[in-house]
Amino acid sequence: MSAPNEHCASLPPPAPLELLEADELLALGLRASAAGDAASALSFFKLALARHPGHAHAHWMLGAEYAALQLPDRAHQHLARAVELDPALPVARFQLGLLRLTRGDVEGAEQTWQGLDERPADDPLRRFGRGLLLLVRGRPAEAQLELRAAADDPATDPALRRDLKAVLGRIAGGEASVSGAAPPDPETVRDGPSPAEASIGSHLALSAYAGGVRP
């Protein structure tokens, strides 16, 4: 009969983190984030950036993780840097625009989402952005059409579809609103999410749309 620890003793030791490449660290960070281990996720993403400061995907993932933790200033810093480094990252661009919209910067969101205009007109991210802009401008019926079309598109990533349906549910219940009249008070941002952030755009979770949206 084998000793209880015989099998464990035969396993190779875990690889030292210094041997891991940036993409491997990002994969570990994604797994940690999906498991709800935000501390480990942040550690992996920060380590990847420490080694490769110009890694667009690392900035994107770190920014999305900060957004999920309700740290909008840090989220904005890294999402903006990701888009600056790689303007063709559609999900990072969408999340940056969504973060700006939920903080009251409607013009900034619209300008950010203009970078998605090269994608097909029926692209789910483009439609989601258009729908939210229509909503903030007091046109819920038109917003609903855009959001419903994106939600019903078979190509829409499941995580994105869940967000779309959540917004549609809030519109149907008369609860959805994005406050775009003025930027949130700095004290509110520092102390926690504004009402707008809590309503529609609060879950820019890292797992959302990370791999399923059309490139």
Image (cartoon, helix red, strand yellow):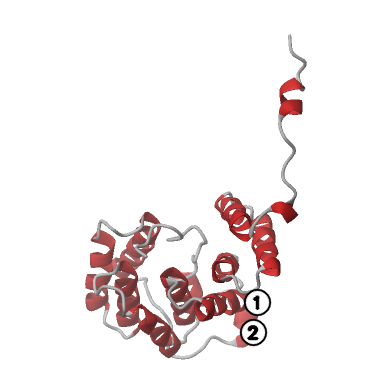
Name the secondary structure under disc 2: helix
How packed is label 1: few (under 14 Cα within 10 Å), some, or many (20 or more)? few
Q: Nearer the viewer, residue 125 or 145?
A: 125
Residue annotated with mark 2: 187
Q: Are marks 1 and 2 in contact (CB under 8 Å)?
A: yes
Left or right: where 31 falls relative to 8: left
- Quadrant position of residue 13: top right
Foreground pick, 208 / 194: 208
- Residue 5 in the image: above or below residue 99: above
Say the numbered circle drawn on residue 191. 1
Callout 1: SS: helix
Answer above or below: position of 107 versus 130. Answer: below
Tally of numbered tags: 2
Residue 180 sits in quarter: bottom left
Amino acid type shown at disc 1: Asp
Q: Nearer the viewer, residue 195 or 161?
A: 161
